[in-house]
Amino acid sequence: MRRFVPLLLLFSAIPASAAAAPPRLLTPDEALARDAERYAARFGVGAEDALLALRKQFASTAITDRLRTQYRERLAGIYIEHQPRWGIVVVLTGTAAPPPMVIEEGGQSFPVRFVTGAPVTRDVALQVLDANRATLAQAVPGYRGAGYDTRTGRLIVMQRPGIDPRSADELASALYDRLGIPVRVRRLEASMANSAAVGGGRVEGPDNGRRWVCTTGYVVTDGARSGVTTAAHCPDTLTWRAPDGEERLLEFAGGWGTAYRDIQIHTRIGPAEPVFFSDRPKTEVRPVTSWITKPMTRSGDWLCLRGESSGYGCSEVELTDFAPPAELCGGLCSTSWVTVRGPECRRGDSGSPVFLGTTAYGVLKGGAYLAGGACAFYYYQSVDYLPEGWRLLTANR
């Protein structure tokens, strides 16, 4: 395997006596094993079973794509379940349930079961949600965003508690009358915010008289220049701060921060290599070998992040179609965002890489922060929405 220079670590020459030990470059197998350790602890399984589950997660994307096509007229959603055993669940409208099956592919077995009775298809639910995002913000006091739950086929409307005199059931009934499809109200004692300007690396910059901290995500290229991503709501003027204390002023190449994405790119990063820090002390880096798009992502997928504030953590995807409150997107937010269950996320993680093993999924935008700073969930932008002309730099180029 080619040996990569760690991302942004060698911006300039440093005397040998002052240079910090370079972080270790993990192999793809080592990187996935790190994430499997977190999976094993979460679900109480052995290391081998955890690793097998994550390998199945990658291998099953082609299977779930075929299932989406096969059942598209009735499809409410597809999700991954982990207990009592790993499997694929297909949620359908109607009452006729296909028999469960086990798909054998690539030397692995993929159990599939079907759940029926969903009220509407995913396509219908998203059409209704997209058409009523402004209406929901006006009709729901303390509105904190909305999404679609592939597990139940219902819209999820989030609301801050203590503002609306109606019960959650009463509000859900009123929204059903207005929208024509079932709704579940989730009351969340949390502030919804961008992971405010507090990848793997630390960048700092001034904005409105304050100094903010963000996290870099991935190295990208437009064919002529190389750059590094972070969140668009971070300051335009950013200084990279390396683990050994070196600082470098980055050049702002552009920001894209409305509706369906929140990303900016900075150039003059030095030697560009497709790696990112993945542990809290920044002693390890991972190569980027591939990526997963939003349509390939399922509720229940196991994902990890590395943020400047929260460090390294892993959890499950909750909603694959989420629209944050409008004030966080410079106007109405689209349903392009993906949410991941907490508690790993804190203010300062803006721009963090979201990944599994050495596969890139996206960059973190913000989270729902509970009292004391804990995280109910975070939401990220898929790599689908990189700016036009830019692409991820990968180990195989």
Image: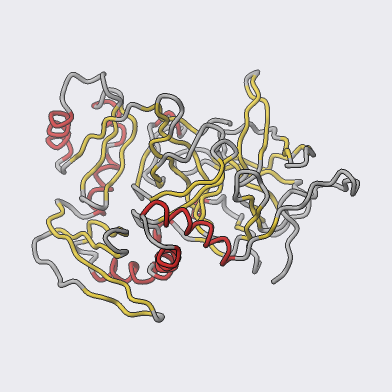
Q: Where's residue 195, x and y in %?
A: 51, 34
Drawn side of residue 235 relative to residue 195, left or right? right
Side of 73 where 360 appears, left or right: right
Q: Nearer the viewer, residue 137 or 162?
A: 162
Q: Nearer the viewer, residue 134 or 243?
A: 243
Q: Is residue 350 above or below residue 338?
A: above
Across and down, in percent, residue 355 comes to 51, 54
Q: Quadrant of the N terminus?
A: bottom right
Of the pair 291 and 318, the residue shown nearer to us: 318
Counting from the top left corner in percent of width and height, residue 206 is at 67, 25
The residue sitting at 14% across, 51% down in the picture is 119
Residue at the left extreme of this rendering: 95
Image quadrant assignment for residue 164: top left
Residue 5 appears at what percent x and percent y?
75, 58
Relative placement, left or right, of 179 versus 221 is left
Which quadrant would residue 71 be assigned to in this image? Answer: bottom left
Location of residue 187 (image quadrant): top left
